[in-house]
């Protein structure tokens, strides 16, 4: 579906959008330019402007392919159903991942784009905006970070990871001392795109989340699979972007780390995380 040069066109569009819509507004937002979609879930004028520019540009790269943007879904939740259409394609866009960080002036935010065809992610791009680092992957063709091929890195010590805050608290509360010793530092950057890039670099070894909004995780899950690892749902099935958002994800860039973390996860009771 992607023609030669299309992946580079997506990357250029993302960098152009970040330069035009995100960076000029970073640490320069008026209070009326920030609002809550729901308690604790922020959106800014930068999110909206970024999504509009991305949608316009992506329509030129693949005419006729629908765009499922995070902010558009807020207005029309039925758009999510486009991701699960058999035999058809759509773009999934997170125009500003880490909005709470952005609004607070913290330099941990990203932009995420992925392409889905027949319910599978076939292309993914993540731009770490403050550090201008681009990760890109096409299904079956590997993953690159700033143009350099990336392969999963085996941690030298216990695997460290990034987790949703509620999940991390349950790990800290319920894991025995010996179980906890099998893991390294557990934290969150409040920016899924940045977290996936840091897993690719080896800074972190894995992630684990209950809520898996496709604009947060579809691109990164493809990247880790292309790096030699994998992304699984809590029930052990491969991650898919059209799956229910509350079916969880455990992902790592090496099969051994993924198996180790999943084994620890399954030894304790997490009623909070039970698949619905």
Image (cartoon, rainbow, N blue to C red):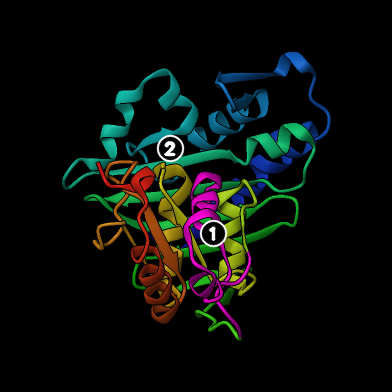
Residue on which the image places disc 2: 59
**Secondary structure under the numbered disc 2 in the rendered image:** helix
Q: Does 274 appear above or below 39?
A: below
If the image is split into quadrants, where does the C terminus sit?
A: top left
- Residue shown at 64%/35% (left/top)? 99
Left of 47 or right of it: where is 257?
left
Q: Where is residue 145 shown, x and y percent of the image?
A: 59, 69
Q: Where is residue 42 shown, x and y percent of the image?
A: 61, 26
- Residue shown at 80%/37% (left/top)? 105
Q: Nearer the viewer, residue 12 or 235?
A: 235
**Magenta-colored span:** 157-185
Q: Is residue 165 magenta?
A: yes
Q: Residue furthest top?
A: 32
- Residue shown at 45%/43% (left/top)? 215
Q: Where is residue 151 shown, x and y percent of the image?
A: 50, 80
- In this view of the protein, can residue 115 be seen by the observer? yes
Q: Does 161 appear above or below 84?
A: below
Q: Which mark is residue 8?
A: 1
């Amino acid at each position: 579906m992607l023609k030669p040069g299309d992946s580079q066109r997506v990357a250029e569009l993302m960098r152009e959008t970040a330069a035009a819509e995100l960076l000029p507004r970073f640490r320069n937002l008026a209070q009326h330019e920030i609002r809550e979609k729901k308690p604790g879930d922020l959106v800014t004028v930068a999110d909206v402007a970024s999504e509009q520019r991305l949608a316009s540009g992506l329509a030129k790269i693949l005419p006729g392919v629908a765009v499922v943007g995070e902010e558009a879904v807020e207005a029309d939740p039925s758009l999510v159903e486009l991701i699960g259409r058999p035999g058809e394609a759509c773009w999934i866009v997170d125009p500003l991942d880490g909005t709470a960080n952005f609004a607070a002036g913290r330099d941990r935010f990203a932009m995420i784009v992925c392409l889905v065809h027949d319910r599978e992610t076939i292309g993914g791009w993540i731009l770490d905006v403050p550090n201008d680092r681009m990760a890109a992957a096409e299904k079956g063709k590997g993953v690159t970070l700033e143009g350099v091929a990336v392969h999963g890195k085996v941690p030298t010590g216990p695997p460290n990871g990034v987790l949703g805050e509620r999940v991390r608290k349950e790990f800290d509360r319920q894991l025995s001392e010996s179980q906890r010793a099998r893991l390294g530092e557990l934290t969150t950057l409040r920016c899924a795109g940045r977290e996936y890039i840091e897993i690719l670099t080896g800074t972190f070894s894995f992630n684990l989340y209950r809520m898996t909004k496709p604009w947060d995780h579809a691109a990164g899950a493809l990247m880790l699979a292309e790096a030699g690892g994998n992304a699984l749902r809590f029930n052990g099935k491969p991650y898919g972007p059209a799956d229910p958002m509350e079916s969880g994800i455990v992902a790592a860039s090496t099969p051994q780390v993924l198996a180790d973390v999943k084994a620890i996860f399954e030894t304790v009771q997490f009623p909070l995380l039970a698949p619905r």
